[in-house]
Image: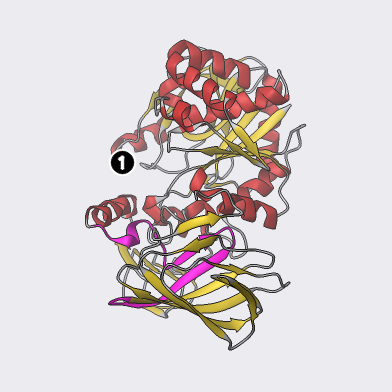
Amino acid sequence: MIVPVILSGGSGTRLWPVSRASYPKQFVNLIDPNRSLLQIAAERLGKLTVPHTGIVVLANIEHRFLIAEQLCQVGADVESIILEPVAQKTAPAIALAALHALSISREAKILVQKADHVIPDLDYFFTAVEKADQSGEPLVIFGVAPTKPETRYEYIELGASIAETGLSRVTRFFEKSDLKTAQSYLESGGYLWNSGICLLDAKVYLDELGKFAPEMLAACREAMDKAVVDLDFCRVDEEAFTRSQSDLIDDAVMKKSDKVSVLPFGSEWSDLDAWDAVLDQLPTDRDGNAIVGDGIIVDSKNTLVRSEGRLVAALGVEDLLIVETADAVLVSKKGAAQDVKKIVERLKSDGRDQANEHVIGYRPWGSYESIAKGERFQVKKIIVKPGKSLSLQMHHYRAEHWVVVSGVAEVVNGEQTFLLRENESTFIPLGVKHRLTNSESNDLVLIEVQSGSYLGEDDIVRFEDNYGRSV
């Protein structure tokens, strides 16, 4: 039995300003106007032609409600959402998935891929999975036949063929290379891109991990033994998981094990790790230009314009990546997009909110959007989804005014509980317990005006919460 696994814990800093820590790239509609990368990956794995369970998603605990909501939207068959309490690399994350898979079947295999992979030819992919499964090889990496001298990917050197399987042994792994070296790999024909997609015998992977990184395996075992199951969520024990080393699967196991093989994958594949890669996946005009959102491109070539709000116009430019959001604009030359993370690092060092937060913040009950902000005041647009409720809370430093734009709000304001309808309002004094609930079947939209000496999101004292957030 194959257990499909999606790794969805990354922050996607190279795709800033659209991708940020609070809402990273896997939740964004980057190449499909109607589906996020996570949703595309979930739908792909749900259509596997081999016997398989529902999907298992490894994710940052802060993103749990985003993941659950997006998977629900596409009707994904979810086996479990395993929540990582701290950010670790792929080796321990995959160990958690393998341990969970063995709780389903002692013969389980895990098909691992990241949420940001693009695989247009699903029939080819499904056939490749069948071939890897039938080969009997315990640790199979999907190696993509290179189509150009790509410097963004790591490479695998093909070894001896494994009779009657279509697979080969792995001679060596190579880190990302310069253009000249990548060109030599392409010309030789004996090298493949390391896609990061793996089909692993769960028991063998854990055995090999125990051989090469026993402390990591012990920490992951303890973390899963002490895990708490909450609906679709598996909350891994934080203290135990934090003791695990943070390492990549290739460094922890694949480069050391003699049980690794590679399946040459000859169909189109991409890892959307930078804006260059996104442009490659979008429909373009005859000059190689692509527009997403409200944009105009004139007398320009090989340029991406992506706008989330304002009109963006590009004139007489070439090889540019222009990305607009409500609070930031990125302009980068193609080829430099891998270094966008340097901007994020600079923003963090300067203490800028744009490094991690969007103007729109997503919560399990809906979303909020900052409309205006100044000295001692902030104006937000609040959307509460049907049947959802904010926590019962209070603030030490700010008062709030609520005005209903549409829908019906059930309000707790101190000792009072009452309904507010369109154009009605209430005032929440500083230090007073309050709560907002939408019991109707349509979205509740309201404007919140905050005033006070401190307006940060951390000025919240929760007394009751429906979503397991700290009180």
Question: In the picture provided, is 382 more to the left or to the right than 327?
Answer: right
Amino acid type assigned to the residue bearing label 1 in the image: Leu
Residue in the picture at 64% in, 84% down? 421
- Using the rendered image of the protein, determine whether residue 461 is visible from the camera's viewpoint: yes
Relative vertical location of residue 429 with respect to residue 392 in this rendering, above or below: below
Q: Residue 235 falls in which quadrant of the image?
A: top right
Question: In the picture provided, is 401 more to the left or to the right than 129?
Answer: left
Relative vertical location of residue 468 with respect to residue 176 in this rendering, above or below: below
Q: Find out whether residue 305 is within the magenta segment.
A: no
**Closer to us: 261 or 71:** 71
- Using the rendered image of the protein, determine whether residue 263 is visible from the camera's viewpoint: no
Q: Residue 410 falls in which quadrant of the image?
A: bottom right
Can you identify the residue that label 1 sits on? Answer: 179
**Closer to us: 372 or 216:** 372
Residue in the picture at 68% in, 43% down? 231
Relative vertical location of residue 208 with respect to residue 401 in this rendering, above or below: above
**Closer to us: 467 or 413:** 413
Secondary structure under tag 1 reads helix
Residue 429: x, y in percent? 44, 75
Q: Find out whether residue 354 is within the magenta segment.
A: yes
Mark 1 neighbour density, 10 Å: few (under 14) some (14–19) many (20 or more): some
Residue 338: x, y in percent? 33, 50
**Magenta extent:** 351-376
How many numbered badges does the structure rendering display?
A: 1
Residue 426: x, y in percent? 53, 81
Please state, as top left, top right, bottom left or bottom right, where the N terminus lies in the image: top right
Q: Residue furthest front?
A: 415
Residue in the picture at 28% in, 60% down? 352
Residue 56: x, y in percent? 64, 37
